[in-house]
Amino acid sequence: MLSTLFGSIQSKSPRRPVYSLVLWIGLTFVLVAASTYFLSQTRPAVDYFTHREEEPEPPANRTNPLLTKEGIDQFVLDHAYPRLGEKTNFTGLHQLCNSTKWQTHVYFTCSHNAGGLMNVRNMVLNCVRYAIAAGASGLVLPQIEARDQADLTHLRTEEYRNMGFLFDETWFKEVMKENCGQMELFDTIEDIPYSGYAMMPDVLNIQAIMEQPRGSKHGALRNKKPWEFRSRFDNLIKSQKRRPTEKSPVIVRLDDRTLFSFPPTFDPPSVLNSFGFILDFRLDLSALANFIVDRVHQTLNASAGNDSYVGLHLRSEPDAGKYWATWDQLAEATISTAVGNEIKLIYVASGDTDGVAKLTKKAVDSGIQVLDKWSILSGDEKEYLAPFRFDQQAIVDYLALMRSDRFVGSGQSSFSSHLLMRRELLANMTLAEEGKHLEPGSVPRDQLAGPGRLGYWDMDWP
Ligand SMILES: *[C@@H]1O[C@H](CO)[C@@H](O)[C@H](O)[C@H]1NC(C)=O
Ligand SMILES: *[C@@H]1O[C@H](CO)[C@@H](O)[C@H](O)[C@H]1NC(C)=O
Ligand SMILES: *[C@@H]1O[C@H](CO)[C@@H](O)[C@H](O)[C@H]1NC(C)=O
Ligand SMILES: *[C@@H]1O[C@H](CO)[C@@H](O)[C@H](O)[C@H]1NC(C)=O
Ligand SMILES: *[C@@H]1O[C@H](CO)[C@@H](O)[C@H](O)[C@H]1NC(C)=O
Ligand SMILES: *[C@@H]1O[C@H](CO)[C@@H](O)[C@H](O)[C@H]1NC(C)=O
């Protein structure tokens, strides 16, 4: 199983430095880097299909071990395990794929996934779910459209990155191969045989296939008849001039309207509660998150003797909707949660630096300390995290909030809303392991401030 696979990685003992080996590795690295650079210079900028961009290598900086390959690999081994998904029971997915009627020469790509971290996650999951529903014979590894660094409201940048930009690609491949091996995985679209001769060159829209209004707002994209998708898809394939064959395959490229489109509750609980775990976050940032949580616990143990902390998603950045939870509501809810539970520390995730400073000041009156990822990490770690994009850095916050004892978020934020759902699922799993159930009427550990929860919260995979 997967645990043995990762177990073998984990149990590797650290190697002694062998200097000539280091020299050779260094030399090879320079050669590979140089040839990669020259190859990238000769590649067309954007071709007809989206392409696969390699992650830029971090600059060599011997004074910061995290900026070396060996250093970050060791950091991952020390802090990234066990993974969230390792306990997941994928039997439901296995059965779903086993009972699917698979096509031949029909492939799916999932490249137009743009937006905040949780929205991208949802879009990728939905696209993969539609590929399974369609019985696609193959799937190209999903890609992510990175949002504009300078203008976070600019989503459709056409800057396509590998799924490794946010997610653990190795994990995804292993889980899919093991549980849904009927659908072959391809690294790039060019790896599909005769991809240059593919039928259906236009991007496809789920709402058009379902003959629903296109819908522009989040939550308006819900597939109202998911059970009809397969027959409608099959009709679409039949309507092509030719049947798909090896030399003229069908390559489906879904557009960006997969967001909150597939209703997860269409699937039985065995799929509903496991499908989200086919995506796990990239290992280096997962390790950094675990490292942060350990440090929070140490901080607390040193002072208060109680290592619980409240996680707060302070979604009060300028782009938050006007009717969303305000800073006051979020601060109020968080501090009263901390006071009520005798918790002495708040971990805050926010892009609103003034808001964090204000909260820090206010919490002092109640003897509560406020920390965020930047105040917890030291120089080397900050230097590693700082160059990452906004949505990549959000992984660290997401996982640190996931592990908090209490959580307060903004009711209208899909990031907060998803955290609430995932935390509840994990708590349920822990209770089930202990042979218990959530007591009806028990005090919830988490809350969303503001005017209610976003209307389509049930459209995300826990
Ligand atoms: C897969 O489906 C077949 C019948 O279609 C069944 O005999 C077999 O047991 C199933 N395998 C799993 C692992 O569910
Ligand atoms: C995994 O899930 C399947 C069906 O959803 C169930 O029959 C099986 O007992 C579960 N396995 C474990 C180890 O919990
Ligand atoms: C905190 O202190 C308790 C008791 O001294 C100890 O059992 C526990 O492992 C400590 N936790 C951490 C995270 O250091
Ligand atoms: C420690 O924190 C938990 C938070 O869930 C709280 O219930 C408990 O009363 C606290 N204990 C002490 C000794 O402060
Ligand atoms: C290397 O790391 C050190 C310590 O983190 C930092 O002060 C320095 O600016 C870095 N140098 C380069 C060239 O990035
Ligand atoms: C957790 O369990 C409760 C009670 O059994 C259930 O109502 C709830 O839907 C579960 N939550 C999730 C996210 O699965």
Image (cartoon, rainbow, N blue to C red):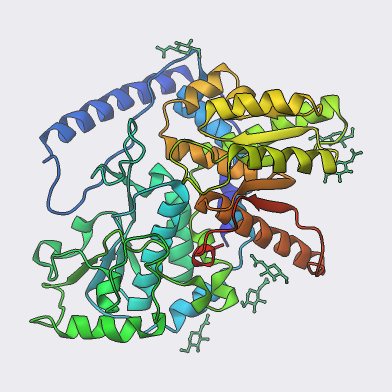
Quadrant where the N terminus sits is: bottom right
Does residue 78 appear in the picture of this structure? no
Indicate which quadrant contains ligand 2. Answer: bottom right
Question: In the figure, 185 relative to 407: above or below?
Answer: below
Q: Is residue 16 left or right of residue 263?
A: right
Q: Is residue 190 left or right of residue 176?
A: left
Q: At 54% from the left edge and 67% from the top edge, which residue is drawn?
A: 458
Please identify the quarter of the rendering in which residue 365 is found. top right
Where residue 454 appears, as percent x and y from the top left, is: 53, 59
Q: Is residue 89 left or right of residue 240?
A: right
Does residue 430 appear in the picture of this structure? yes
Where residue 304 appears, as percent x and y from the top left, is: 86, 29
- Please tell me which residue lies in front, 456 or 3: 456
Question: In the figure, 213 relative to 460: above or below?
Answer: below
Which residue in the rendered view is the most extreme toward the front?
Answer: 323
Quadrant where the C terminus sits is: bottom right
